């Protein structure tokens, strides 16, 4: 079962990268942390199947882009944007809700966590079976 992990919102503000260049951004709020995807990169990702960077977003008298914290790409089915944050798991949001936010029809799009695949333990020896040991 997928559980809500945060939301995406389009902002009219710009964030400055490490070179001092301002970029239009889309804010991601996931598990209480703020991230950003550059709007121009996101439009490229939606129109074609390319990876885009998910970056830290910090506020200090304005918004600033920080380190790359993950990657985002359109799913194989073309119906969702999958976000993979390094060490923090995978998340997804509907591409139709993302487009509604980008075109100004909606304010927010819900981001949900993709559950981790459970590890399957294969038990080869059942109760009552004999095991054969091998000396090497």
Image (tube, rainbow, N blue to C red):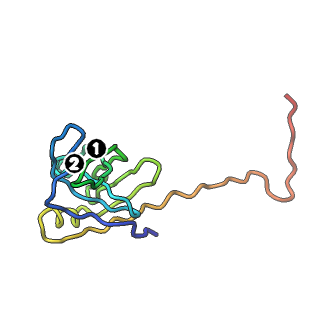
Q: Answer whether labels 1 and 2 touch (C-beta < 8 Å).
A: yes
Badge 1 marks a residue whose secondary structure is: loop
Tell me which residue sits at (20%, 37%) in the image.
19
- Quick one: label 1 or label 2, which is nearer the N terminus? 2
Q: Is residue 98 above or below residue 131?
A: below
Q: Residues within 10 Å of mark 2 (few under 14, many from 20)?
A: some
Tell me which residue sits at (79%, 57%) in the image.
126
Q: Position of residue 15 (x, y in %)?
A: 20, 51
Tell me which residue sits at (72%, 54%) in the image.
123
* In the displayed structure image, the side of residue 135 where residue 25 appears, left or right: left
Say which residue label 2 marks. Answer: 45
Q: Residues within 10 Å of mark 1 (few under 14, many from 20)?
A: some
Badge 2 marks a residue whose secondary structure is: helix
Q: Which of the labelled discs sits on residue 75, or is there none?
A: none
Say which residue label 1 marks. Answer: 51
Furthest residue in direction front, as rendered: 61
Alpha-carbon span between mark 1 and mark 2: 6 Å
Query: Camera-side residue: 74 or 125?
Result: 74
Q: Position of residue 32 (x, y in %)?
A: 39, 64
Question: Residue 132's image quarter?
Answer: top right
Question: Number of labelled discs?
Answer: 2
Q: Position of residue 22 (x, y in %)?
A: 15, 46
* In the displayed structure image, the side of residue 114 where residue 76 appears, left or right: left
Q: Is residue 63 above or below residue 6?
A: above
Query: Camera-side residue: 114 or 53?
Result: 53
Furthest residue in direction top, as rendered: 136
Q: Position of residue 136 (x, y in %)?
A: 84, 28
Tell me which residue sits at (27%, 53%) in the image.
60
């Amino acid at each position: 079962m997928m559980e809500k992990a945060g939301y995406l919102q389009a902002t009219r503000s710009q964030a400055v990268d490490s070179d001092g260049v301002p970029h239009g951004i889309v804010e991601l709020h996931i598990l209480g942390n703020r991230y950003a995807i550059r709007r121009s990169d996101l439009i490229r990702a939606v129109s074609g199947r390319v990876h885009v960077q998910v970056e830290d977003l910090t506020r200090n008298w304005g918004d600033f882009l920080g380190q790359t914290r993950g990657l985002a790409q359109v799913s194989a089915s073309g119906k969702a944007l999958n976000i993979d944050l390094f060490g923090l798991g995978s998340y997804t949001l509907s591409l139709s809700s993302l487009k509604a936010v980008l075109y100004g029809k909606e304010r927010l799009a819900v981001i949900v966590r993709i559950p981790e695949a459970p590890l399957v333990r294969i038990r080869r020896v059942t109760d009552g079976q004999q095991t054969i040991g091998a000396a090497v």
